[in-house]
Every structure is written in C-alpha cells, then in structure tokens.
Image: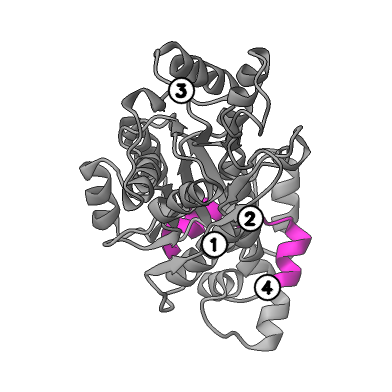
Amino acid sequence: MTKPQISQEISQDPLRFPVTKDVAERAGVSTATVSRVLNGTARVRADKHEAVMKAAEELGFVANGAARALSMRRFMAVGAVVPNIENEAFIRVLSSFQDRLRQEGYTLIAANSGYDIDNVLREATFLIERGIDGLMLVGDIHHPLLHARIARQKIPMVQVFTLSTERACIGFDNAASAGRAASYLLDLGHTRIGVISGLRKDNDRGGARVEGIHAALAARGLRMLPEHDVEISYGIGGGRDGFRQMLASGAEPPTAIICGTDQIAFGAMIEARSRGLDIPGDLSVIGHNDSDFAAFLSPPLTTINVHSAAIGRAAGDHLVSRMAGRPTVRLTEIDAELIVRGSTAPPRARG
C-alpha cells in the first residue's frame, strides 16, 4: 500500500482512525519502532524518530492512552479520599496535592467519604480497580480490607493529618497540638475548659485532640466536667448545638472552649452572642484549621493552623517519589501552630 492510498483510505471512512501500522507504513519503519518512539521506552535513531513523528502528525494519529497505560502499567492518575470535601483544611490539602501531581503529569481523582470507613473502603476500592498509580487517605483508621487491597495491588499510599506508627504519613501530633491550646488557656487562668468536637468514631484525629486536652488539664491537677465534653456533627449549626448543650446541662458553664474546627467555633460564638455573652470577656474560644475567615471574625478567632497546604505538597512529593521508585521517608511531621487572636483572654474576675 502506498502512502497516498493510506491517506485516501482513512479520509474516505470517517470511522477509520489511523493506527500504529499506518504510521509505520507512512514512515517506512516497523510497528515496533513506532511504539518505541511514541512510548519513549527505548532510544531510536534520530532520522527514524523524526519520520515517525512527521507521519503521526500528517495522519492525525492519536496514541491510545488507555492501551499504553495497560502495557506500561501506568495510568498517570492518583486517587484521594477525604472525610469532608467542604472542610477548608481538606480543600487546601487537595489543592496543593493536585498542584504537585500536575507538575509530574498526573491527574487527581478525589472522593468524599463523610467520615465513614465503609465509604472510604468503597471509594478507594473503586479507584484501585480503575488502575490509579497512588492513593492519599486521611487519618490512620481504615477498614482492614482496604489495607489488604492496597498491599495486594502494591499501590503507593500516604496518609495525611496523622502520624502513623506503621504506614507512610505526612502530618502532626493531634494530641500535642490540642494540648498546646489547652495549656495556653490554663496559662491565661482558665480552669473550666470545655471541648466541642466533631465525630470521633473511626476518627483518630478528633479523638486524639480531645485526649490531648484532657491530658493538659490532668497535668495541672484539673479535670473537665463530662457536661463540658460535647461531640456533635460538623459545621456552624453543630457549634451552636454543642454550646447550647453545654449551657442546658445545668453545670456551671465553662469560661473557655476548644472546638474541633473553625466552623464549630464560629457556631459556638454565634450562640454565645445570642445569649448576651461577651467574647472573650465571658467566654474564650479556640478553633482549629485557621480558615480564611478566622482572622476576620469579630473578634478574630484564635485557632490552630495545621499547615494543610504544606501537608498536601509534602504528600505529593512523597507519592511522586514512590511512584518513580525512589526512596522516601516514611514519616514527615509538619507541626501545627497556635495562632493567638482576639477571641481568647484571661477569665473575668468574679465579683
């Protein structure tokens, strides 16, 4: 078949796409040479390389990415499953994670689990079955079947926002960061400190933070009243509900509260204001995540900055290296930071 015949055959049949054989015949080389040039799997003589590229361009040849991925066992896609796609900390980690992956030609596919390990299993399994090259998960508590599948498929995986004793991770000490916030309130003179956290079941981060607050109190010979330890759903509404629950308990109200997220803290502040309480005069409030709005509340919110963007970039660095077969460090700690603003002050002296 001559070169003009190839072009004519393709142009006369709108469903006929050029294939590797067409490019080989147009370039006057073998199909193996075409594959080596297009896949970059071996060195090819410069004149043959140029002939193949010119023939592919003339014929409008588009390499079959799926077929190439199957042959090379690389799909250039990375999966991520996060608990709440609306949480600003997870948005930041995904954004910086994706930016790092994009630099290496990878596409990110993200899913939301709703803080349910069965959902994490389902979403991650879906991604694994479709051939992702790597996976990012949040936290260290996951379904045993998921870890088995990751190991069986030999998929590089990294966990974020946690410090795992067994698996690759990028994060911080959740207990220590929350304990630091409690110690700051204790240093201000607060002794009645409460906590409003999100869901703790299958959530090693939330549980560890509450434990860190209790430990900081215990170190000063104090204990938190059970009525001041509240677990609620997430969001501003959850924060309002949590503070209402504290006040409805009948116990003497706390003079300071530490919240699982900035949104929860904002809800608690709204509820406190609706009851005529002054912040920070009557109630000091600390959030978590240092959301964009935290510095612009009235008063500005004291919070814990977990450096989500830095965690995302480091997670991207880790997986890029793992997927390339390069050595990596199993654990990377990016310490959380207490940002002191106007929502905290010493407790008001009793008259």
Residue with the mark numbered 4: 52
Residue with the mark numbered 1: 316
Q: How far apart are marks 4 and 1 (CA)?
A: 35 Å
Nearer-N-terminus badge (1/2): 2
Residue at point 62% right, 28% down?
Answer: 282
Q: Which mark lies nearer to you, 3 or 2?
A: 3
At mark 4, the secondary structure is: helix
Nearer-N-terminus badge (3/1): 3
Q: Does the magenta stretch include residue 231?
A: no
Q: Is residue 61 magenta?
A: yes
Tell me where the magenta segment starts and ends, as one range: 52-73
- Give the quarter of the image for residue 85: top right
At mark 1, the secondary structure is: helix
Q: Where residue 56 appears, x then y in whole percent?
A: 70, 64
Nearer-N-terminus badge (2/4): 4
The amino acid marked with disc number 1 is: Gly
Residue extending farthest bottom: 45
Q: Do the residues labelled 3 and 1 touch (CB within 8 Å)?
A: no
Residue at point 25% right, 57% down?
Answer: 151
Residue 233 shows which numbered tag? Answer: 3
Q: Are marks 1 and 2 in contact (CB under 8 Å)?
A: yes
The amino acid marked with disc number 2 is: Ser
Q: Do the residues labelled 4 and 3 touch (CB within 8 Å)?
A: no
Q: Which mark lies nearer to you, 3 or 1?
A: 3
Residue with the mark numbered 2: 96
Nearer-N-terminus badge (4/1): 4
The amino acid marked with disc number 3 is: Ser
Q: Where residue 259 appears, x then y in whole percent?
A: 51, 35
Q: Which of 337 and 11 is in front in this view?
A: 337
Q: Where residue 291 appears, x then y in whole percent?
A: 66, 41
